[in-house]
Image (tube, grey):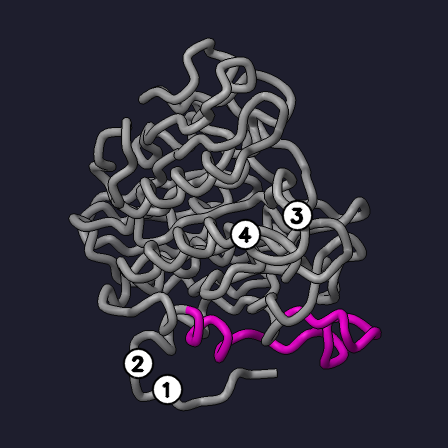
Amino acid sequence: MKTKGVWWAGLTVTVSAALGIWGVNRAEVPWNLNSIHLPPASGVMFAAAHPVTVAILDTGMSEQPLLDGVQRAGYDFVTNPRNAGDGTGRDPNPLASRGGAGGHGTAVAGIVHSVNPQARLVHVRVIGRANMTTLADARDGLRWAAGLDVPGAPRNPFPARVINASFSLNTVPHTGCAPAMQRAVDEVLARGTVIVASAGNLHIPAARNTPAGCRGVIAVAATDDRGRRTSYSNWGSAVALAAPGGTAREGVDVLRPGGGESELTGTSFAAPLVAGAASLLLAERPTLSPAAVTRLLEQTAQPFAGGQCDAVSPHSCGSGILDVGAAVQAARSWPALASLAPRR
């Protein structure tokens, strides 16, 4: 049985090409991955011939040797040629801008890969050089990622079952989900695609943001290495659950374009942990609906340190902290666990 070892951010992942089994050396797992209880080295079975596709709705694709073979070029939906940085506006080349925030998409993709090394990662560029996106670009990118028709763009050859959106729209009022985005979210969910979004980093209710405040989206808050809400993380009723996002004292190791690592913090890096977990659930049980995936993640979440994520009660962070191992085990018993209340 052929296996290969992949070293990333202090994590050794062993992949069996023959059986689609992977496991981790738990002695070398970074704190954020250790906190979410990745499945043990005994393995998780996948249908290796049919990997789950996760779309990275972000700054675009960069060369990164540790993602060779799993990441794919999707489409560039940045309309403004000046912001796109390539002089062409929308086109089939979703390469990220160099410098600035251009490496954000690679960092997010690497985190998804650390949770599910067999996920196919499709980059859909919606954020340009100015670290901004528009409602129209984000909406069209979201729809395209799920395999829906977008005028002027070819059909996505790899429709995603999971979409990670680690951004918040600053071009719309922070009064809730923009109606046009909610309509797009509803279409994507109807196709059976899970949407995971970062809650945001402004220490305000996540419900004010787009897409985190949209109905049906799994909004993810950030916790620190002690299992409490980080001071920057958005919070409130829109948040489904939390995952490690890091602090200045203890950040999250992420991949950099071209090679190497850096240490960053934010709900941007909590959300892809949940997106990776969602892809594992769909690899285990492909017929799960987005609502079922959400319920499994919420029901199996770990309790926060001290029983709540923040001493201030309104600053809630959903059902708990992501527990990947428990969620995968629960998926194997679905729908027997469908009626269970979330773990608090």
Mark 2 residue type: Trp
Considering depth in this image, is 3 or 121 the residue closer to the camera? 121
**Residue on which disc 4 sits:** 178
**Residue 195 image position (x, y, % from top left):** 43, 56
Closer mark to the observer between disc 2 and disc 4: 4
Q: Is residue 64 visible?
A: yes
**Residue 131 image position (x, y, % from top left):** 62, 29
**What numbered label is drawn on residue 334?**
2
Q: CA distance from mark 3 to mark 2?
A: 39 Å
State yes or no: discs 2 and 4 in contact (Cβ < 8 Å): no
Q: Secondary structure at mark 4?
A: loop
State yes or no: discs 3 and 2 in contact (Cβ < 8 Å): no
Q: Which residues are magenta?
A: 294-317
State yes or no: discs 1 and 2 in contact (Cβ < 8 Å): yes
State yes or no: discs 4 and 3 in contact (Cβ < 8 Å): yes
Q: Is residue 29 visible?
A: no
